[in-house]
Image (cartoon, rainbow, N blue to C red):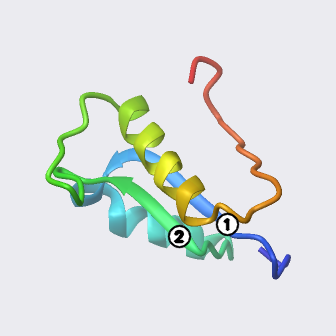
């Protein structure tokens, strides 16, 4: 969060409708600041519906990589062993 040349992203497969507010409150309660918080939408920006959380995350990360193509490094921290 303190590194000015880093983009911090919280990405979860939880739904926007059901979890947006609670995730924002959880992050704030721990003084965590993210540049982006990505939650799985009911319908994606191109009208797509995501078959799974993994499909959503792959699409999100692909868009992120193409948006920030000048990035020298990407680090992903996953809390699930099987993801």
**Dot 2 alpha-carbon crowd within 10 angstroms: few under 14, some 14 to 19, many 20 or more:** few
Name the one closer to the observer, 77 or 23.
77
Q: In the rendered view, does 34 fall on the left or right side of 17?
A: right
Residue 79 locus on image (x, y percent): 65, 35
Q: Are marks 2 and 1 in contact (CB under 8 Å)?
A: yes
Cα gap from disc 2 to disc 1, whole angstroms = 7 Å
Give whichever of discs 2 and 1 has the lower sequence position.
1
The residue at which mark 1 appears reads as 8
Image quadrant where residue 22 sits: bottom left
Q: Quadrant of the C terminus?
A: top right
Q: In the rendered view, does 20 fall on the left or right side of 32?
A: left
What secondary structure is marked by label 1? loop
Residue 74 locus on image (x, y percent): 75, 51
Name the one closer to the observer, 37 or 70.
70
Q: In the rendered view, does 48 fall on the left or right side of 36?
A: left
Residue 64 locus on image (x, y percent): 54, 58
The residue at which mark 2 appears reads as 36
Examine the rendered structure and indicate whether residue 33 appears above or below residue 37: below
């Amino acid at each position: 969060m303190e590194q000015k040349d880093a983009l911090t992203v919280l990405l979860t497969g939880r739904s926007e409708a059901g979890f947006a507010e609670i995730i924002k409150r959880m992050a704030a309660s721990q003084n965590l600041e993210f540049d982006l918080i990505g939650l799985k939408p009911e319908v994606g920006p191109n009208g797509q519906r995501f078959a799974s959380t993994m499909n959503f995350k792959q699409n999100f990360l692909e868009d992120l990589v193409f948006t920030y193509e000048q990035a020298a490094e990407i680090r992903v921290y996953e809390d699930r062993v099987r993801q």
